């Protein structure tokens, strides 16, 4: 006796959720073709992932454009597509800060200043750089914390994809989580980083092709940007939903409940630079470039595309404030009441504007984004576990073939752990509240350690380890303090009027400051390494290879300047 599809789904999670739309044959074919292509890519590239250099670093053969698109696409998962669309509904255009001041300066800094040190040291990971600069203690601490963060972030992508399937197609969460996780595990385990990168470039194109439908059709319905602003003001009664900077003079003047110091220093300095310059998920893509110039250009190319991403992510959230006939709520409240959460903004808008055929393309774009985020985290977890935990401390003398085999197996293990962490997201108000908390725990102090290691030759091994440990402990301690005593928020975020997002930004800032201060103090109390040992690791004592660009317009610094000017102009326009 054969079970029906509905009964199979019920085995996972009880009755099937009511669906908002029904896919026709064309929609189903589009989605099925996409899954077939990504798995085919994994099998096709399996023969190009036989050595550790090929499996973990794609053989360091990627061009600047492929590495740059992969660099952006690895970050274009649920964090971008659903998390910030939901945050735009909550906070308005303020969410754009996480794309512009929260990304562009750091991406340019990575390409111009930091990339030469990562690339010429030939490290396979950021913890690998810390091993060269600060020794085994800093490497172990950063590798363990990073591995923990990647599986949590991968769980976010799994949960988000399942949420789309629930809202759009009526599938239950558990079934959708397992479908996506098995697919990602297959193509990453088969083709390694090369497979992940090629799929991320494909996913980048699909995301733009499918996700553009909502903002274009939404602006047509709203009657243009000016009319949209008037409608938002009428519905929410707050002009700051469409201004980025003018309402940041006081915590009470904007819907996010944050001050400009939190945006500039907590986000723009600490979280942004921490993520884009030390999070191995994105740095790994740049390290796959075939030469130093390509490695420097990749983040700059990525920054150019990053400038435009709010059009397909933030704008749908703003449109929802204008056109949706009902109010959305936090994730935990939605789970309890059966309502729609902030995180469901994008799929709800997709259903609103996309008919048969177009709906399949839109859903495929969302699936591509989530699988890109999952694959990025899983491949980074595999590399850090194999090189910086297993190979560094457990089995130092294994063969290259053994490490590749370990990388493949821990890909599946990482996916299984990620499945478990996917359900933690249900307890957060929104995806972005959850993500920003993770960044303050792991990324902010790591940036303090890496930047001091690269720019200050006096930093010592003991200083790097104790600075990183104290910064991480500070972030966790501040989170626990506010979690147990909500009144403590006024001390952490400097105001009784601050809200949750402000807490995340200031927590990151304090953890970074503690890391830097402890690193400096301990370094002055301990003996530094001889300068000769720091060549290739510290700015000022390392000869950088010459780049022979024939024309001025080929230089990375020129294109970084172009992107910086566009960044300044965009912030002035939406002030």
Image: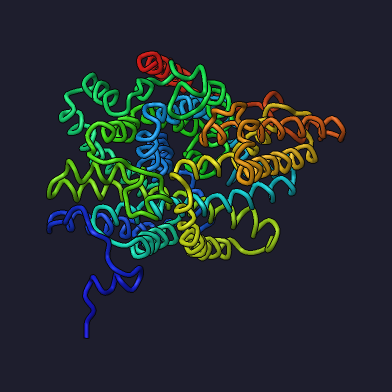
Q: Where is residue 293 in the image (x, y as percent from the top left)?
A: 48, 29
Q: How many labels does the image show?
A: 0
Residue at image location 57% in from the left, 34% down from the top: 503
Q: Nearer the viewer, residue 329 or 40?
A: 329
Q: Position of residue 193 (x, y in %)?
A: 45, 51
Q: Nearer the viewer, residue 231 or 11?
A: 231
Image height of 344 relative to 382, above or below: above
Where residue 170 sits, quadrant-wise, is: bottom left
Q: Nearer the viewer, residue 174 or 388?
A: 174
Q: In this view, does 236 lie to the left or right of 139?
A: left
Q: Is residue 181 left or right of residue 9?
A: right
Q: Quadrant of the C terminus?
A: top left
Where residue 461 sits, quadrant-wise, is: top right
Q: Position of residue 232 (x, y in %)?
A: 28, 26
Image height of 492 relative to 5, above or below: above
Q: Can residue 195 be seen in this view?
A: no
Residue at image location 78% in from the left, 30% down from the top: 520
Q: Can residue 247 be seen in this view?
A: yes
Q: Where is residue 234 in the image (x, y as percent from the top left)?
A: 26, 24
Q: Is residue 6 left or right of residue 174?
A: left
Residue at image location 66% in from the left, 32% down from the top: 510
Image height of 568 relative to 186, above or below: above
């Amino acid at each position: 006796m054969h079970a029906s599809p509905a009964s199979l789904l019920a085995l996972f999670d009880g009755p099937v959720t009511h669906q908002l739309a029904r896919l026709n044959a064309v929609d189903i074919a589009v989605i099925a073709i996409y899954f077939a292509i990504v798995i085919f890519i994994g099998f096709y590239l399996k023969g190009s992932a036989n050595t550790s250099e090929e499996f973990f670093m794609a053989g360091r053969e990627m061009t600047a454009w492929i590495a740059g698109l992969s660099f952006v696409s690895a970050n274009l998962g649920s964090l971008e597509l659903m998390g910030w669309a939901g945050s735009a509904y909550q906070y308005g255009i303020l969410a754009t800060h996480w794309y512009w001041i929260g990304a562009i300066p750091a991406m340019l800094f990575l390409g111009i200043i930091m990339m030469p040190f990562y690339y010429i040291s030939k490290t396979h990971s950021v913890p690998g750089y810390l091993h060269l600069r600060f020794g085994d203690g800093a490497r172990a601490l950063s590798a363990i914390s990073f591995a923990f963060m990647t599986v949590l972030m991968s769980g976010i992508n799994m949960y988000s994809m399942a949420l789309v399937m629930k809202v759009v197609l009526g599938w239950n969460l558990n079934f959708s989580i397992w479908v996506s996780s098995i697919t990602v595990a297959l193509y990453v385990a088969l083709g390694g980083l090369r497979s992940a990168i090629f799929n991320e470039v494909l996913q980048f194109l699909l995301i733009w092709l499918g996700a553009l439908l909502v903002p274009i059709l939404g602006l047509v319905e709203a009657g243009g940007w000016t009319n949209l602003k008037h409608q938002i003001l009428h519905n929410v009664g707050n002009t700051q939903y469409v201004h980025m900077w003018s309402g940041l003079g006081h915590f009470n003047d904007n819907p996010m409940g944050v001050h400009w110091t939190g945006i500039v220093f907590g986000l723009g300095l600490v979280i942004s630079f921490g993520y884009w310059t030390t999070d191995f998920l994105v740095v790994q893509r740049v390290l796959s470039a075939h030469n130093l110039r390509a490695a420097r250009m990749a983040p700059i190319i990525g920054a150019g595309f990053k400038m435009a991403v709010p059009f397909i992510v933030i704008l749908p959230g703003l449109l929802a404030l204008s056109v949706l006939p009902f109010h959305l709520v936090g994730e935990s409240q939605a789970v309890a009441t059966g309502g729609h959460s902030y995180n469901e903004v994008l799929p709800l808008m997709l259903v609103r504007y996309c008919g048969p055929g177009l709906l399949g393309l839109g859903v495929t774009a969302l699936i591509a984004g989530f699988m890109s985020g999952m694959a990025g985290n899983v491949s980074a977890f595999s590399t850090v576990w194999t090189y910086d935990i297993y190979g560094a401390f457990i089995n130092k003398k294994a063969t290259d073939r053994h490490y590749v085999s370990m990388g493949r197996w821990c890909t599946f293990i990482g996916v299984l752990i990620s499945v478990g962490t996917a359900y933690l997201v249900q307890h957060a108000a929104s995806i972005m509240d959850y993500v920003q908390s993770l960044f303050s725990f792991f990324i902010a102090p790591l940036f303090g350690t890496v930047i001091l290691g690269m720019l200050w030759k006096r930093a010592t091994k003991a200083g790097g380890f104790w600075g990183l440990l104290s910064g991480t402990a500070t972030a966790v301690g501040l989170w626990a303090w506010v979690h147990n005593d909500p009144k403590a928020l006024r001390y952490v975020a400097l105001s009784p009027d601050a809200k949750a997002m402000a807490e995340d930004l200031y927590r990151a800032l304090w953890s970074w400051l503690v890391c830097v201060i402890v690193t400096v103090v301990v370094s002055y109390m301990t003996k530094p390494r001889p300068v000769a040992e720091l060549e290739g690791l510290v700015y000022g004592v390392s000869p950088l290879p010459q780049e022979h660009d024939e024309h001025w317009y080929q230089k990375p610094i020129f294109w970084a300047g172009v992107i910086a000017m566009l960044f300044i102009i965009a912030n002035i326009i939406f002030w």
